[in-house]
Image (cartoon, coloured by chain):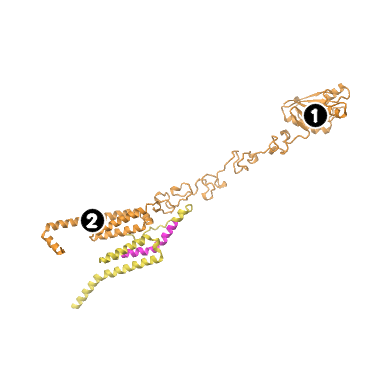
Amino acid sequence: MRWLVLAVGLFAIGAATGCGPIQVSSAVKRANIAMSQAQLNGWDKDCPYEITAAEGYLAAAHDLIGRSEFGAATEFADKAARLATSTQDNAARNARTRQIRESSQKETSEPAPAFPSEAPGTGGAR
Amino acid sequence: MTGISMLQSLFKYPRAALVLLAFTTVSGCATSSEIETGTTTLEKLMAAHRESLYNCSPKALANAEVAISLARFESSHGRPVAARTAMEKAKAAVRDAWKGSEDRKCLPDHDADGIPDVEDKCPLLPEDIDQFQDEDGCPDPDNDNDGVKDVDDQCPLEAGTPANRGCPIKDQDGDGVFDNEDACPIVPGPRSNRGCPVQDADKDGVLDSEDKCPNEAGPAENEGCPYKLISITNDQIQLKQKVFFQTAKSVILKESFEMLDEVAMAIVQHSRFKVRIEGHTDSKGNDKANMKLSQARADSVRKYLVSKGVDSLVLTSVGRGEDVPLDDNSTEAGRAVNRRVEFLIIEQ
């Protein structure tokens, strides 16, 4: 009986202290993978906002891990992952927008196609 | 002093502890409230101009948002100093973002016509940049409102007709013939000559369009052609041939009709002419008879001219007999010269 209590106690302690680090490391890993993909595919060049924010949130997550703030660190790492992932969609749209702007400045007499309707900057700090 | 010894000393001095607690609480609340207000203000500021910040200061915008999140987090976890630090970073980042997005091109411009939505009366329709009302942001497909679209309008700033490709029909030479019908649009000319000036190549005063002999000077009464058998001087209608009569009679021979017809035409056209027809003979024969014959012949000519339409009032006829010879009557040639009819212009 004593052993059982001890095992449950140890499990509870482990769960209480171990879950946070496990979750955060998983979130950080996701964020890192997403950022690597963005850089590998060149999406980061067309998404300076998303990639800079992702880097900022990831740095904050690391900082919070150092202070054992695993919950907040996970939250920040998740944001970083979302932002880095969003570069895949936003890169094409931003590149097209830039193209339109450049062409409208060069050949102003030609009517430009309509601007994409969706709002830029998904996954902002909230 | 360790933490335990600090606590012990606080318990020894409860009043001091209360004061310290109150200060800490008040300062903490104040900091938390300040952070909340500050971050909310920054967020509102950024939200109002998010698109321009996103377009032109994406990194600063990202840094500001991360710093705001951190400031909130630190504040909510009771770490006012860290919160303040993050807040200051956020402020600095927002300032940077603002500076970077001051350019007009950073403002939202949904139709991408280079005119920001705030100044664009038609934010979803791109302006057609064509030097005509380009500042309002609205396209003007027919600048001059003449019903001809600018793309097909060769004069997009001047109202014209579709038939003239949108250009106004002008009359550059002001001759009353519009350029589209004017074969000579910059030289005035009458409509009858398709707007071209009427020429008078032979300078006879008869325009080429009415001149049957445009390259030979001739009077208007002869349709611009020169007389063949007569000429008009200041005081005389001169004949290039003689008027032939039957011998010793006043009957005019046929071969002189054509020439006398020209004389009749000249007198009719010169309505102010008054002409004296003089008959002359040579010196052969009786003077009285010669006088009589010359009068008869002058009368005969006058009668012929009247028959051709000449007003009888402008003609007089006189027989001069042998009194006014032009040449020597002792030779045949001289006498031939002296036998003549003259048309003297006595009034014009």
User: Which chain does the residue under circle 1 lie in?
Assistant: B
Q: Colour of chain A?
A: yellow
The numbered disc on residue B304 is: 1
Which stretch appears magenta? A77-100
The mark nearer the N terminus, 1 or 2, is: 2
Q: How many marks?
A: 2
Q: Which chain is orange?
A: B
Amino acid on which the number 1 mark rests in the picture: Tyr
Q: Residues within 10 Å of mark 1 (few under 14, many from 20)?
A: some
User: Which chain does the residue under circle 2 lie in?
Assistant: B
SS category of the residue bearing label 1: helix
Residue A113 visible in the displayed image: no
Among all residues in the image, which is located at the extreme top?
A: B288
Rendered image quadrant of residue B205: top right
Q: Which residue was labeled with disc 2?
A: B31
Look at 39% across and 65% down and name the residue there: A39
Camera-nearest residue between A58 and A6:
A58
Label pair 1/2, CB-CB below 8 angstroms: no
